[in-house]
Image (cartoon, helix red, strand yellow):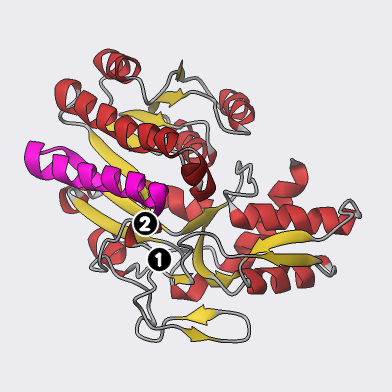
Amino acid sequence: MKYLITGGCGFLGSNLAAEVLSLGHELVVFDNLYREGTEKNLEWLRSLGEFTFYRSDIRNFDDVSTVFQKEKPDVVFHVAGQVAMTTSLDRPRFDMEINVLGTHNLLESIRRYSPEAMVVYSSTNKVYGDLEDHKYDEGEKRYSMPDFPNGLPESTTLDFRTPYGCSKGAADQYMLDYSRSFGIKSVVFRHSSIFGGRQFSTFDQGWIGWFVSRAIETKRGNLSEAFTVSGNGKQVRDVLFSEDIVRCYFSAIENIDKTKGQAFNIGGGANNSLSILELFEMLEEEMGIKLNYKELPPRSSDQKSFIADIAKANEYFNWKPTVDKRTGIKKMINWVETI
């Protein structure tokens, strides 16, 4: 089997690429090395085995189509994308070109040159909007949605908000429609929060890794002033460790007859939900520190709570998380300390 991974030097992409190499399959990595940490991940992947690397841009149709004409992959993991809400607001056209145009370039290349390929797309929970039309309970440390104790299902109404939600949502829908219209074997994963090794988190992307790094700097005595939190810290996500997300992608491919043309909400599920304040509490317990932070206004269209109902994924391809949130956080602390 030949695997092509777009954004293969990013956090998710490099974890998927490492798994391909460990299984002994042929690997093609496509990345423009734009994001922080991608060059380090490329170097790490090269230490694991041999593969073909294209330093190319998903926004350029010639770049994308040339790779498909030459490589003709059996499996595509399309995880290249602009993933920061703040960047989408600052540079909405940039966001659109990567997420919408880039995905369309990929789908057209598959349709023309690799029509039998299987493709899994990394979408987002932001396709459901800010979810402000739902009922919330506000507790001491978290928001909850009493009408959805097991999380939100895929039948939740799509409601694109902000340029990021629009661009990822459009790509999400193109993926599903190319399955309906052209028979492309596409699968859409609407991710909640994922984290783990090889993730070089920043202030606007990768919140668990970012706050873990603030905790480590606090323990080392390197923070001279309070760090910031957008909102009151009661926002909730279900968190999923990298080992489980990698297994999710490969399981979907192994069951492509069931998963093709389908969208799945993918996250840690209700048992692995976590608010920012609860994360802080966990970090303080694990590291023996006291975090010093101050609140900023909430981010535009931020969801008070999103927990994925993962029952459909379990039904269609027998997947569910195995790494609990505390174990994952401990592993994340160990990873961030090595950076």
Q: Residue 186 magenta-drawn?
A: yes
Residue appearing at x 21%, y 32% in the figure: 117
C-beta proximity under 8 Å, tags 1 and 2: yes
State the extent of the magenta-drawn residues as a range: 162-187
| Quadrant of the rendered image containing residue 263 | bottom left
> Can residue 301 be seen?
yes
Q: Around disc 2, counting alpha carbons within 10 Å, would you say few (fewer than 14), some (14 to 19), or many (20 or more)?
A: some
- The residue labelled by disc 2 is 161
Number of the label disc, if any, that sits on residue 130? 1
Within the image, what quadrant is residue 11 found in? top right
- Would residue 254 be seen by someone viewing this image from the given angle? no
252 lies above or below 68: below
| x 34%, y 67%: residue | 310
Q: Position of residue 28 (x, y in %)?
A: 40, 23
Q: Position of residue 269 (x, y in %)?
A: 43, 70
Frontmost residue, 127 versus 193: 127
For the point 66% across and 73% down, the residue is: 277
The kind of residue tagged 1 is: Asp
Q: Residue at x 30, y 19 (%)?
A: 61
Main SS of the magenta part reads helix
Callout 2 secondary element: loop
Q: Where residue 120 appears, x then y in whole percent?
A: 30, 42
**Image quarter of the C terminus:** top right
Q: What is the three-letter code of the residue carrying label 2?
A: Arg
Residue 210 screen position, x and y as percent: 67, 52
Residue 173 lies, with reference to residue 110, above or below; the image says: below
